[in-house]
Image (tube, rainbow, N blue to C red):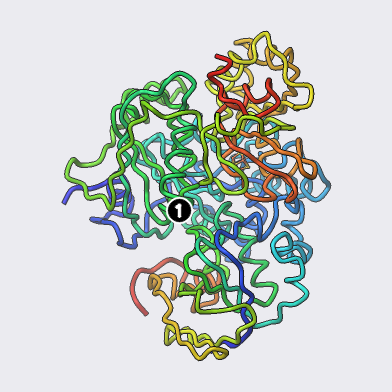
């Protein structure tokens, strides 16, 4: 069970919003890169977010480049999960690979600052502020298994290979 | 049940009867990294403790995004990548060779292959009939080690293109039109499959432009059947033996069929800060432009430079508008010198940059100032993309870019043709 506060963003938050190209030179210095997370969209985000909080966005979160650094620095900021109406394909896959859950739900029912409780196994999020319960979209079994192990690297270290069989 | 291009290629590469929605483990023919995603991939490869490389000959590292390096940090990343290629036997395309996607097209990708790159525009190779898709550093690191990856077989949209382009209209305008029509997330998780008489008559350069921009509609791949045009392209790049005919079954199932007649299409421009925010170029007349950039994996090929040079020949850029040109590869630059295009650009007041990504992603070589606007032939105009969140990026064809450089404002190229 994850519990934290919602930080609300709009539609089409791109990887250039999350980790701007001008900080390209910081990609091998992730703690420095993390300081600039989302700074063009929400300048005070990194100083306000606390471990366990959630990024809550509209459609197509993470569109744009394949830079996995975007998912990595969101995780480094302590964000427990990204909740969005939809997510761009590469970002979604990257996030799961680094152990950051991206959960699809109707985020119109969540406002900035709401307290949320996410039940990953049960597939739902409860808005503790409004009392509304939202179902989470399902994702492929292979992704669940990768997420369960904490990401693709731990998964491969443990299993040595991909496997399409269920647990 | 018949198969789409995506289903055909992924069935073959997974050794299964794959249909849309299935999860498969597919053999990867070619995996690559670039200098922005490569260092993290190598760290992940090391962390995986899979100290092996499945097929080193088909793994390539490109130094193209920060090329030549603008900073100490990036020069050190380059050292890391170069050292790795030396130790592992993995192939290196160093500074000055060109943009990864252009080099993949010129020298590496073939019909029917699965191509995985740690760069979203890996989709470009779909123009050759390869299933090519972008992933992140970790996925590509694992594909390098295991020689395979997991994929969800995508549903496909069939894009049927009819009619011929009017003068001054190109595949870039069609790409912007399609993205405007279906939206920046309209094809998320889907493959776009291009066909129809316009596509059959289209040269490889323009096919690459269309495939390249598939990802701007959210697509996982932008696929073309391989045909005589593909065969000739491979032949001109010394690998005709790797040609094979690959096309979808006539009874393949598509999630959507989108029909487009291009006969009335006009030069299009994408406005800040979203690729699907499009308008005809002529409606934007009067929008002042401080920088024009011709290049990138979308439009930095010889045909693109030829189009721009034909408009710029004997003319000068507007005094208030900088004109930057970055050929997509060394081969393109060499041929552009031979054809006299580079001379034309220099005489028109242009600045010619080395082969590579140039200012596309805001690293170097043309970062915009506060409040400035750029008309670029690239594929993305997100806020901050070219290094400054206070700047504005418009996207258009090389013809629109050249015409706008001369006029100093967004200009329909037909005014100068
Ligand atoms: S030219 Fe631009 S879009 Fe293409 S690979 Fe380079 S940075 Fe990416």
Picture layout, residue B218 above or below residue B343? below
* Residue drawn at the location 42% of the way across and 66% of the way down: A162
Q: How many marks?
A: 1
Residue B148 figure quarter: bottom left
- The C terminus of chain B lies in which quarter of the figure? top right
Q: Nearer the viewer, residue B55 or A113?
A: A113
Q: Nearer the viewer, residue B195 or A140?
A: B195
Seen at 32% across and 26% down, the residue is B163
Instruction: Name the residue rendered at 27%, 46% in the picture.
Output: B4
Picture residue at 37% right of the left edge, 49% below the top: B191
Location of residue B36 in the rendering, given as x and y in whole percent from the top left corner: 66, 49
Q: Position of residue B400 (x, y in %)?
A: 58, 26
SS category of the residue bearing label 1: loop
Q: Residues within 10 Å of mark 1 (few under 14, many from 20)?
A: many
Farthest residue, direction right:
B72
Which residue position holds label 1?
Answer: B147
**A87 or B144: nearer the eye?**
A87
**Quadrant of the rendered structure where residue B338 is?**
top right
Q: Is residue B335 left or right of residue B165?
A: right
Report whether residue A152 is seen.
no
Q: Tell me where residue B261 sits by quadrant.
A: top left
Q: Chain of mark 1?
A: B
Respond yes or no on whether mark 1 lies under 8 Å from ligand 1. no
């Amino acid at each position: 069970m994850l519990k934290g506060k919602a930080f609300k963003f709009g539609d089409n938050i791109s990887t250039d919003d999350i980790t701007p190209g001008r900080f390209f030179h910081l990609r091998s210095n992730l703690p420095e890169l993390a300081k600039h997370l989302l700074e063009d969209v929400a300048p005070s985000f990194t100083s306000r977010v606390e471990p366990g909080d959630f990024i809550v966005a509209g459609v197509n979160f993470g569109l744009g480049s394949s830079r996995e650094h975007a998912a990595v620095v969101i995780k480094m900021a302590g964000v427990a999960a990204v909740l969005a109406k939809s997510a761009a394909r590469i970002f979604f896959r990257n996030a799961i690979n680094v152990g950051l859950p991206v959960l699809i739900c109707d985020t119109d029912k969540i406002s900035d600052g709401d307290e949320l409780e996410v039940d990953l196994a049960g597939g739902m999020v409860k808005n503790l502020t409004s009392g509304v319960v939202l179902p989470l979209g399902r994702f492929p079994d292979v992704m669940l298994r990768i997420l369960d192990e904490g990401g693709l690297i731990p998964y491969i270290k443990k299993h040595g290979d991909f496997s399409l069989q269920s647990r | 049940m018949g198969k789409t291009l995506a289903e055909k290629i992924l069935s073959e590469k997974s050794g299964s009867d794959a249909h849309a929605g299935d999860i498969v483990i597919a053999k990867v023919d070619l995996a690559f990294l670039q200098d922005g995603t490569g260092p993290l991939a190598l760290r992940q490869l090391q962390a995986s403790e899979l100290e092996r490389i499945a097929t080193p000959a088909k793994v390539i590292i490109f130094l193209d995004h920060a090329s030549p390096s603008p900073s100490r940090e990036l020069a050190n990343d380059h050292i890391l990548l170069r050292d790795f290629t030396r130790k592992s036997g993995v192939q290196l395309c160093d500074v000055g060779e060109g943009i990864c996607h252009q080099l993949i097209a010129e020298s590496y990708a073939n019909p029917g292959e699965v191509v995985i790159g740690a760069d979203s525009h890996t989709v470009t190779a779909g123009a050759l009939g390869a299933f090519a898709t972008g992933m992140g550093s970790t996925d590509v690191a694992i594909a390098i080690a295991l020689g395979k990856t997991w994929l969800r077989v995508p549903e496909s949209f069939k894009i049927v293109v009819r009619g011929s382009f009017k003068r001054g209209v190109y595949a870039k305008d069609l790409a912007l039109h399609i993205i405007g029509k279906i939206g920046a997330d309209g094809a998320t998780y889907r493959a776009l499959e291009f066909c129809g008489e316009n596509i059959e008559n289209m040269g490889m350069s323009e096919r690459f432009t269309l495939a390249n921009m598939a990802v701007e509609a959210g697509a996982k791949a932008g696929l073309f059947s391989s045909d005589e045009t593909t065969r000739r392209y491979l032949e001109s790049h010394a690998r005709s033996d790797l040609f094979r005919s690959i096309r979808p079954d006539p009874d393949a199932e598509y999630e959507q069929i989108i029909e487009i007649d291009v006969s009335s299409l006009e030069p299009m421009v994408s406005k800040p800060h979203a690729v699907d925010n499009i308008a005809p170029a002529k409606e934007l007349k009067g929008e002042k432009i401080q920088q024009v950039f011709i290049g990138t994996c979308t439009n930095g090929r010889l045909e693109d430079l030829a189009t721009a040079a034909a408009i710029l020949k004997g003319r000068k850029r507007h005094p208030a508008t900088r004109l930057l040109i970055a050929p997509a590869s060394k081969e393109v630059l060499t041929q552009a010198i031979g054809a006299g295009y580079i001379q034309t650009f220099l005489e028109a007041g242009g600045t010619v940059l080395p082969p590579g990504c140039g200012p596309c992603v805001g690293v170097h070589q043309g970062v915009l100032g506060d409040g400035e606007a750029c008309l670029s032939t690239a594929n993305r105009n997100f806020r901050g993309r070219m290094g400054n969140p206070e700047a504005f990026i418009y996207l258009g064809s090389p013809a629109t870019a050249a015409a706008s450089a001369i006029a100093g404002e967004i200009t329909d190229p037909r005014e100068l043709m």
